[in-house]
């Protein structure tokens, strides 16, 4: 029996509608929600991602202020811009598109963003709030995954979740989030990575499996526990074809599974919109 689809597209549409309604309500009070985007250089993928995020904002009524800077931008000039955006009361969220050109210090730039405007949820202050279990802006992809599981009534509380991948944007914060004593989480979480000798043995134990390593077809269908929920969060490309960390045949074994396209990605983008709204209202603090 084929797995139930964890439909990120449908859920993201609901989230966008909710955000749009709240943005409109703020607009009726004379309050405009604004996201500043910062793009350095002309990397095609980065340019495409920023354009998509700006379009998402436009569709829900969030205003964007675009800052497209030359690839040879000096570090001091980047930090000066971020400082100005921090100080601008009309800007509620700041999105710094990564990767930056090699001569720029990404970590210093990310640290320069006001945590209250950090809509990616990756500033150490926001990650620290996640560790402590206190309110803050959550990293977009982990927050989207938790919502996706909850919306499809996947049992998580008290279950064994295995996260394959320990990256800053997904694996590490997701493991922290799923272990918290809060609705839709409260799980026993194991984090593994591609350097673990017997990866298969860990995957086979998972009631909920999240693959976030960025290695195509790393997780074999034969490894998946029958009836498990499988979230393929890591991606890579072969030419222009998007590849999943999980073999597509796993859908014949799993109870729930994200599709190769339309699973986690739309939820990540939707959570960025929600974080911008939360930053504007102060509810994320």
Image: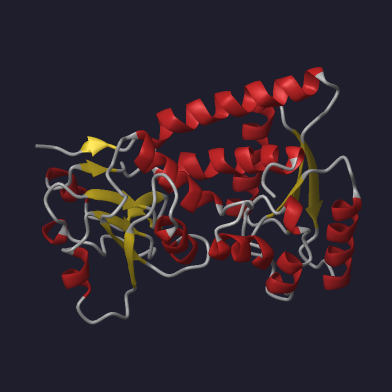
On the image, the x and y values in percent for residue 16 come to 56, 29
Which residue is found at the position 26% from the left and 55% from the top? Answer: 159
Relative to 90, 66 lies left or right: left
Instruction: Looking at the picture, tell me which residue is in the foreground, 275 or 241.
Output: 275
On the image, the x and y values in percent for residue 32 come to 81, 29
Up-down relation of residue 94 to residue 133 (above or below): above
On the image, the x and y values in percent for residue 61 come to 71, 26
On the image, the x and y values in percent for residue 187 come to 33, 57
Which residue is found at the position 34% from the left and 53% from the top? Answer: 243
Q: Quadrant of the N terminus?
A: top left
Instruction: Looking at the picture, tell me which residue is in the foreground, 32 or 102.
Output: 32
Name the outermost residue toward the front: 181
Relative to 28, 171 lies left or right: left
Q: Quadrant of residue 132?
A: bottom right
Up-down relation of residue 45 to residue 20 (above or below): below
Which residue is found at the position 16% from the left and 49% from the top? Answer: 249
Which residue is found at the position 14% from the left and 56% from the top? Answer: 225
Instruction: Looking at the picture, tell me which residue is in the foreground, 108 or 124.
Output: 124
């Amino acid at each position: 029996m084929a797995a139930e689809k964890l439909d990120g597209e449908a859920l993201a549409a609901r989230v966008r509608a909710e955000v749009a309604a709240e943005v409109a309500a703020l607009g009726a009070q004379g309050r405009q929600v604004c996201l500043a985007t910062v793009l350095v250089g002309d990397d095609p993928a980065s340019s495409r991602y920023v354009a998509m995020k700006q379009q998402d904002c436009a569709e829900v009524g969030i205003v964007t202020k675009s800052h497209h800077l030359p690839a040879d931008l000096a570090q001091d000039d980047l930090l000066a811009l971020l400082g100005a955006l921090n100080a601008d009361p009309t800007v509620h969220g700041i999105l710094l598109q990564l990767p930056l050109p090699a001569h720029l210090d990404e970590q210093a730039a990310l640290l320069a963003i006001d945590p209250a405007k950090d809509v990616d949820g990756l500033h150490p202050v926001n990650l620290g709030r996640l560790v402590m279990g206190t309110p803050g802006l959550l990293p977009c992809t982990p927050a989207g995954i938790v919502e996706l599981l909850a919306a499809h009534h996947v049992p998580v509380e008290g279950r064994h979740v295995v996260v394959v991948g320990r990256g800053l944007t997904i694996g590490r914060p997701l493991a922290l989030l799923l272990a918290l004593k809060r609705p839709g989480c409260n799980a026993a979480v194991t984090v593994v990575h591609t350097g673990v000798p017997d990866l298969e043995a860990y995957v086979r134990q998972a009631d909920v499996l999240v693959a976030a390593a960025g290695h195509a077809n790393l997780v074999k269908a034969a490894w998946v526990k029958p009836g498990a929920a499988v979230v393929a969060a890591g991606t890579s490309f072969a030419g222009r074809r998007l590849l999943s960390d999980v073999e597509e045949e796993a859908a014949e074994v799993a109870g729930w599974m994200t599709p190769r396209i339309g699973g986690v990605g739309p939820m990540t983008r939707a959570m960025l919109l929600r974080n911008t709204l939360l930053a504007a209202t102060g509810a994320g603090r």
